[in-house]
Amino acid sequence: MKLFMDRKRDWFVPVVGLLLVFILAARSPLDSDMWWHLKAGQLTIANGRPYLIDTLSFTRFGEGWINHSWLSEVGMVVLFQLGGYLALGGIMALLATVSMGFVYFQSSGPAILKVFLLILGSIVAAVVWSPRPQLFSLVLLAIVSMVIYLFKWKQKNHLKWLPVIFFLWANLHGGYPLGFLLIGAIIAGEIAQNLLEPGSTQPKLSWSQVKQLILWSLVSVFALLINPNGLNIWKIPFQTVEVSALQQFIEEWASPDFHQLYQQPFLWLLFGILAAVGLSRRRVDFSDLAVVILFGYMALVARRNFGPFAIVSVPVLSRSIWAALKPENSDVQSQDAARPDNQDGHRFRPRWQWRLNLFIVGLLALVAFGKLYIVTYPGWMETAIRSSEPVGAVNWLQENGSKGQVLNEYNWGGYLEWRMLDIKVFVDGRTDLFGDSILNEWLGVVQADVGWEQTLEKWKIDYILLDPNRPLVQAAAQKGWKLLYQDSQAVLYGK
């Protein structure tokens, strides 16, 4: 237990933990949605106003689009122009690390325990770390969680910052419902705590504090309106729920597949909470229970919610584990006071140990930057892009000055928009723009369902650019479409 109660590595252990998170998060900035985010940011800068009217597809051309991520898209494209893939990969790793840093400071127990749980939570959240604006949602969710943690567990009232946080959220990413879901779960849990256990000495919000939280949450709802989309920003949660096609062919919206090892850490975290709560000597906190149930359910419905679950559940797990491990009548915040011989935290630490700690931190920082540099090196990135995008086919279209409308793979839409100026796509990753009608129509035609020829004629499609294994590829060849280009990645047909 001495190891767990030693807090003299107060700076060293968390810094090492966060560097390990950065190393885990440092990866190639590759994602099919990244490209259309970059294009939208580029168009926002070029037009001098947020990009809110679609001009990239022919199926939704000229229609309004609720671009809730316009500000983060501008930041992404500026970083890309200044520092290329290295800058994109760096900001991705930094945002992931910052989000988990807030998780660390909400956790209970000694540093070594908190870092262990931090790494577990990071492995769970890493499934959704990608070069997209949703990373801002993870950071802002962690900040909202921090504000509530300080309010309840430390009796420090920073609720006035909630409207500012949600104002930024409404302009950086449409994931702001996560913040309100967290606040709603906390409010429900605190109401239950006050009604069912009014005399409990366990930390809880008073009725007056619950009212304050509700009031600032309502103010935050209206703070969302300070954005280029106006009232439309309130439609985002409903638009997402209405698109039933999401779970059919978009992996991150599907329920997790626990036969895949990289998705199993979610179960470790979930079962760890259940075990820790059972072993803990404290009564279940109703707010913790409500948060774990709500965000656990969301993660079981769609694996894109692994990240939010990790952010809100790791502090819950830490509180339960530390309640089970700590000696009776002890408190983690008072460990230093219990050791008068070590009040300064440095008396028994030799100078060589400080130097060793600095050397280790420096070495980890070098490893972190080295990994980031390697995975974002232009040569490596070009190879990785060729393995996931139709680079050869797009090169052919550009070299031949091609113009028109293309029936494309869903995941390739963003890349085509980033590379091409005179080609309009059928669909891209903006599911909220296309909705079920276009997505299901796209699915039917690439599967060569009955009526596929009429669909191509309806939309006046000039090119077909698909994965070679799509049923439409063979059907189009049989109907006289001309093969223009082919490689292992893509097949391009023209009229």
Image (cartoon, grey):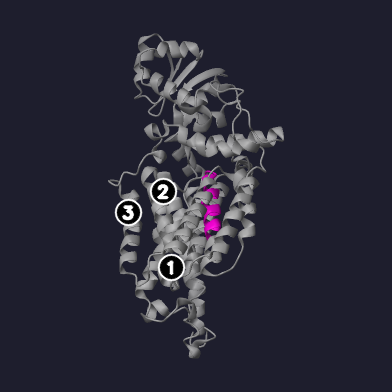
Q: Which residue is mark 2?
A: 127
Q: How would you rate the neighbour count of disc 3 (Cα within 10 Å): few for under 14, some for 14-19, many for 20 or more?
A: some
Q: Earlier in the sequence, mark 1 or mark 3?
A: 1
At label 2, the amino acid type is Val
| Mark 3 element type | helix
Could you say where residue 77 lies in the image, as x and y percent from the top left? 61, 41
At label 3, the amino acid type is Leu
Q: Pick out the residue farthest to the right.
A: 48
Magenta-highlighted residues: 132-146
Q: Pick out the residue farthest to the top.
A: 480
- The answer to whether residue 443 is above or below residue 310 is above
Q: Nearer the viewer, residue 232 or 349?
A: 232
| Mark 2 element type | helix
Alpha carbons under labels 1 and 2: distance apart: 21 Å
> Magenta includes 102?
no
Predominant SS of the magenta segment: helix
> Magenta includes 137?
yes
- Camera-near label (3 vs 2) is 3
- Residue at 35% over, 58% down: 269
Q: Which residue is mark 3?
A: 267
